[in-house]
Amino acid sequence: MLSPSLAADLACGLDATIFAEDRLNFHPDPWQRDLLRSAARQVILNITRQGGKSTATAILSLHCAIYCPGALILMVSPSQRQSRELFAKTTGFLKAVEPVVELEEDNRLSATLANKSRIVSLPGDARTVRGFSAPRLVIADEAAYVADELFTAIRPMLAVSEGRLILMSTPAGRRGVFFETWERGEDWLRIRISASQCPRISAEFLDQERRELGPMLFSQEYENAFVDAASSAFSSELIDQALVDDFEPFLAAAA
């Protein structure tokens, strides 16, 4: 029979939700539970601002690092500052884990655990990402703002490792990989959470934000809508319709 401590550790290894609750004293929202328990290799999170997506993926990253020895976890964002924020949240959880997890390296941009797993934060630069191979998990934060070239560089890295790719963001217009993946991507787990579904965001705050931001920005930031930029002369729908080649050829009348 397994000892209580070994049984508890085995349960944590098998279920990241149990890990969050027992070792981090964090109680996930229902959608966070779905993410932590999912085995989907491709996940796209269309989550409101302050909806808990960074927290959930930080826990998922840490769980992978602890229970998959030798794993490489990459965190990419449009800028180094942004990716460092997600990394800091992850290492914050790491330092709170009970019992303590031993580290071999810990700096502002990466951490190496005693089991040889590595967590690395990177800016959204395809040239930088190409220097890594076979990651177990790649998380793209603010994915709607990451250059398309980065995703072209990431996907081949996952071929050998059969690693996971998680895109998370609020929308930013109807163009780019994040929008295209949400609308037309195949074999993706999609999770959408608006601000009204987040128990930590009050109705009073949302009413104020709606007045301050206006309907278009509010819809994008808090209701997960893919809207066209206010400065666009033509909407994406009109542009798409203009590019459809389904009209009858025009034949000039005979003179």
Image (cartoon, helix red, strand yellow):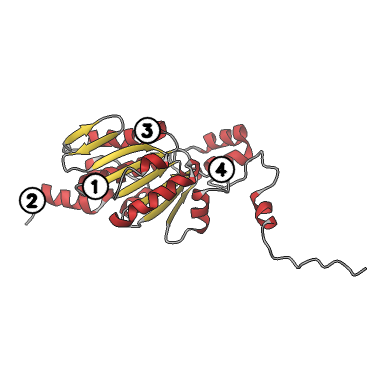
Who's the residue at 47% across and 38% down the image?
201
Tell me which numbered mark, 4 or 3, is placed earlier along the sequence.
3
- Of helix, strand and loop, which one carries label 1? loop
Of badges 3 and 1, nearer the viewer stands 1
Of badges 2 and 4, nearer the viewer stands 4
Residue occupied by mark 2:
3
Tell me which numbered mark, 3 or 1, is placed earlier along the sequence.
1
Q: What numbered label is drawn on residue 23?
A: none
Distance between the alpha carbons at the discs numbered 1 and 4: 35 Å
Residue most toward the bottom?
254
Please name the amino acid that badge 1 sits on. Ala
Distance between the alpha carbons at the discs numbered 3 and 1: 21 Å
* 199 left or right of 161 in image: right
* Front residue of this view, candidates 137 and 92: 137
Of badges 3 and 2, nearer the viewer stands 3
What is the crowding at mark 1: few (fewer than 14 residues within 10 Å), some, or many (at least 20)? Answer: many
Distance between the alpha carbons at the discs numbered 2 and 4: 50 Å
Please name the amino acid that badge 4 sits on. Gln
Spot occupied by residue 246 in the image (x, y as percentages of width and height): 69, 65
Distance between the alpha carbons at the discs numbered 3 and 2: 38 Å
Residue occupied by mark 3:
85
Spot occupied by residue 42 in the image (x, y as percentages of width and height): 39, 55
Tell me which numbered mark, 2 or 4, is placed earlier along the sequence.
2
Residue occupied by mark 1:
71
Of badges 4 and 3, nearer the viewer stands 3
Distance between the alpha carbons at the discs numbered 4 and 3: 22 Å
- Of helix, strand and loop, which one carries label 2? loop
Q: What numbered label is drawn on residue 220?
A: 4
Tell me which numbered mark, 3 or 2, is placed earlier along the sequence.
2
Confirm or deny contact between disc 3 and disc 1 (CB under 8 A): no
